[in-house]
């Protein structure tokens, strides 16, 4: 009887003791690891706040003060990004396609976006830029490129689900390459082991720029302010244009509606260039007479 009691006691007392050691060690390791990753993320970029720190108010303000003549981009882009980032469980990645001539501000806006989401801006490890002529120059290697691009995106998303992907010169991409990217933009919670739904994809392309310029000219010619051109009338036209030429030609991205917004970038009018030159001179604390300003605007083709 006594022996049984003793056995019972030693069992009940031994168990909590070993549990205690276990819990203590785990807490110690967790504490150590926690402070390690805390220190690491204090010094080096991590996929968390404050390295990822969306500042949509700032994005809007900068666009308003430096981004002339692009009313549709101003209305559409910050709102789309804000809604996407505010959603804890977005159903798919945010995908935007920017269209317009070189110099109309597509790259400039991509930088503004990166600068107002990531603390390190465009230099962030989570901003992945693919340039058609640099990364995918040879059309005949499209299947190699597809494998490469897929594994890049997987590793980039493994690093950080809040990644930003920018595809520059989409009109020069080998046709069909982007179909590799499609599953990452779809409503899958897991694709090749990563969850792509928190990321943002931006395509930059010249496709449709002639149409955009023509539409702007028609409004100008009719004496109507270009600010009255609506997103709706442009979107339909741009998706058609993109489907018919360049890297999005016949793309499943378009036919299966993976692209959330087609954003037109209009060629700048003279008044926009003058505003832009004024801004630049002010930032450099240079005073210029109206005549000098005219001359400067004359020599500027891009802003
Ligand atoms: C938000 O962006 C604006 C414009 O770039 C900047 O002036 C401001 O300091 C930013 N705010 C924060 C908290 O980073
Ligand atoms: C992410 O994408 C870039 C291209 O921007 C690529 O060079 C890089 O190897 C990818 N993977 C990682 C883990 O960063």
Image (spheres, rainbow, N blue to C red):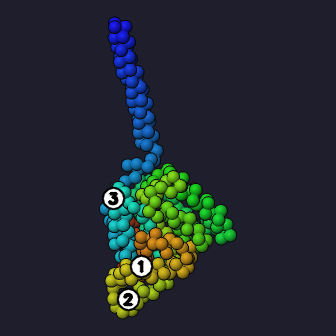
- Residue placed most toward the observer, 210 or 16: 16
Picture quadrant of residue 275: bottom left
Residue assigned mark 2: 219
At x 44%, y 67%, the residue is 95
Relative height, residue 38 to residue 176 (above, below): above
Residue located farthest toward the right when viewing the structure as drawn: 140
Is 213 situated left or right of 152 in this image? Answer: left
Q: Residues within 10 Å of mark 2 (few under 14, many from 20)?
A: some
Distance Cα–Cα, label 3 vs label 1: 25 Å
- Residue placed most toward the observer, 225 or 236: 236
Distance Cα–Cα, label 3 vs label 2: 36 Å
Q: Nearer the viewer, mark 3 or mark 2?
A: 3
Image x and y of residue 236, in percent: 43, 81
Residue located farthest toward the top when viewing the structure as drawn: 2
At x 40%, y 32%, the residue is 31
The answer to whether residue 267 is visible is: no
Image x and y of residue 118, in percent: 42, 55
Picture quadrant of residue 42: top left
Image x and y of residue 72, in percent: 37, 76
Residue assigned mark 3: 86
């Amino acid at each position: 009887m006594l022996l049984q009691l003793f056995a019972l006691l030693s069992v009940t007392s031994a168990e909590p003791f070993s549990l205690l050691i276990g819990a203590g060690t785990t807490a110690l390791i967790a504490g150590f690891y926690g402070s390690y990753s805390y220190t690491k993320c204090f010094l080096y970029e991590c996929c968390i706040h404050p390295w990822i720190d969306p500042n949509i108010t700032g994005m809007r303000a900068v666009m308003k003060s430096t981004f002339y003549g692009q009313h549709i981009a101003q209305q559409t882009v910050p709102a789309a990004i804000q809604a996407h980032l505010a959603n804890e469980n977005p159903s798919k990645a945010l995908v935007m396609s920017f269209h317009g001539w070189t110099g109309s501000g597509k790259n400039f806006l991509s930088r503004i976006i990166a600068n107002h989401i990531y603390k390190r801006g465009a230099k962030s490890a989570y901003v992945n830029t693919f340039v058609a002529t640099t990364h995918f120059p040879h059309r005949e290697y499209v299947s190699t490129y597809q494998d490469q691009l897929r594994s890049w995106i997987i590793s980039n998303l493994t690093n950080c689900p809040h990644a930003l992907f920018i595809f520059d010169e989409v009109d020069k991409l080998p046709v069909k390459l982007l179909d590799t990217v499609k599953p990452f933009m779809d409503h899958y919670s897991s694709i090749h082991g990563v969850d792509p739904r928190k990321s943002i994809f931006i395509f930059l392309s010249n496709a449709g720029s002639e149409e955009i310029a023509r539409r702007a000219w028609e409004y100008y010619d009719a004496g109507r302010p270009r600010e009255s051109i609506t997103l709706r009338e442009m979107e339909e036209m741009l998706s058609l244009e993109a489907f018919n030429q360049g890297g999005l030609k016949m793309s499943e991205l378009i036919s299966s509606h993976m692209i959330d917004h087609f954003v037109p970038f209009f060629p700048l009018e003279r008044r926009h260039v003058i505003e832009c030159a004024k801004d630049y001179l002010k930032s450099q604390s240079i005073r210029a007479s109206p005549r000098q300003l005219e001359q400067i605007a004359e020599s500027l083709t891009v802003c």
